[in-house]
Image: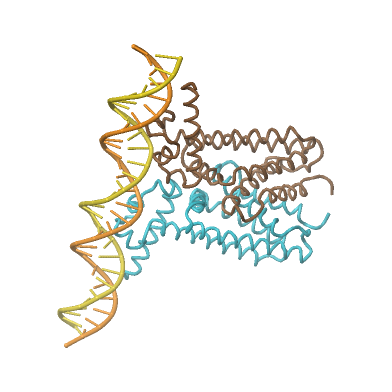
Chain colours: A cyan, B brown, C orange, D yellow
Amino acid sequence: MTTQHRAEETRARILQEAAACFAQYGYDAVGIAEICRRAGVTKGGFYHHFPSKQALFLELLNRWLGGLDMQMEAARRGATTIPEALRQMASKAQYVFEAAKGQIPLYLEFWSKAARDPVVWQATIEPYRRYRDVFRGIVEAGIAEGSLQPVDPERAAQVIVALAVGLLLQGMLDPEGANWGEVMKEGIQILLSGLEKEC
Amino acid sequence: MTTQHRAEETRARILQEAAACFAQYGYDAVGIAEICRRAGVTKGGFYHHFPSKQALFLELLNRWLGGLDMQMEAARRGATTIPEALRQMASKAQYVFEAAKGQIPLYLEFWSKAARDPVVWQATIEPYRRYRDVFRGIVEAGIAEGSLQPVDPERAAQVIVALAVGLLLQGMLDPEGANWGEVMKEGIQILLSGLEKEC
DNA sequence: CAATACATACCGACCGGTCGGTATATTATG
DNA sequence: CATAATATACCGACCGGTCGGTATGTATTG
């Protein structure tokens, strides 16, 4: 096996263990030493792969956001009408919830840091605005194709994003409190009842 | 001035400055020393009033939650029909957003800690479940009085809370990105369009 | 004088990051 | 093909500094 490949594996192990540590204890609470211990590397090895603790954190953030992007793209492409697309996204969300079970605290960690650190903020706010724009485009398309009522697309998009984010948070605080994927579908359903043109 | 009164003022100053510090820098990033400096007290003084940093944090949390309770109670009492009550709460939210402007990161800090610390979690989850129950009761009442469609009250309540929480988060990440109070009203409006019985 | 409300001085643990060094793989050279 | 030169991957001791918390002193008040 090439050293290059081995290095990639080490790097991946660090990322994986770091994600677990951050999710469990929080960014500040977990030290580099602990991550190194769990990943089977020493501090020297760690700082060979990452210039700082924050850089490691940012890489985790970007990987997560990249995954979300792909999920959303796929859901939209696979649908014919706009309400259909939204419903499919809601269904996808169920899978996201399932996959993200113990990791949601990590996402909360992202947001918490974003509120303070300008660099993290930039990395967070940019895709978040992208999502809002995507949904605004979707709502606009829905209005154009006549399947949605002529609401303010910007506002509607904000509401949709808010619903998704809010459910993520509830899922974090009370993971066993409900089938959050189902609640997401129900929520989108209620929103669509108010948005769809068919009364 | 009595010493008792002076002590209360010192205590209040510590709480106030601590809230500002936590909101600005985050729980972990700000040290006791900084809070003391800004409050014009020394460490000895601080630990005379609070047994620990976490105790201070919990007191701030409880004060915030208590305030929310009162706002919601008032909104419900002042309305005749259920949709009316929800709309009024949405309007109140606008005021909450305004008042909480720079403090929302602090609330995020609460949630972030709640995901980890069992004590903070208990203090957070309990009123949060209370809110969900309140909204479930409201939706049930709305169905009973015939102003809302017969949806699952539990789910509807979860959706409402999710919307509120999500908007809080958006308001934190991008305070100047929108008039979040207005978006809240719009969101409740859309939800009600889907929930109200009038088609 | 007793109790309250602070101030001062200090402790020990810990943490992010650095640095000199080593072992192994890769490449260049003769 | 052998070997020298270099780059990569990683080690682990160490450092400056910070932080939550404590022990003890002192001034004020009832």
Residue at the spot 49% in from the left edge and 47% down from the top edge:
B24
On the image, the x and y values in percent for residue B121 come to 51, 38
- The location of residue C17, given as percent across then percent down, is 33, 57
For the N terminus of chain A, the quadrant is bottom left
Q: Is residue A5 above or below residue A188?
A: below
Nearest to the observer: residue D29 or residue B96: D29
Residue at the (59%, 43%) spot, across then down: B100
User: Horizontal and vertical percent for residue A34?
Assistant: 34, 49
Dividing the picture into quarters, in which one does residue A39 lie?
bottom left
- Front residue of A135/B89: it is B89
Q: Quadrant of residue D21?
A: top left
Establish if B137 lies above or below B170.
Answer: above
| Count of marks overlaid on the render | 0
Q: Position of residue A145 (x, y in %)?
A: 77, 66
- Residue A163 vertical placement versus B74 (above, below): below
Q: Quadrant of the C terminus of chain A?
A: bottom right
Query: In this rendering, would A122 be left or right of B80?
Result: left
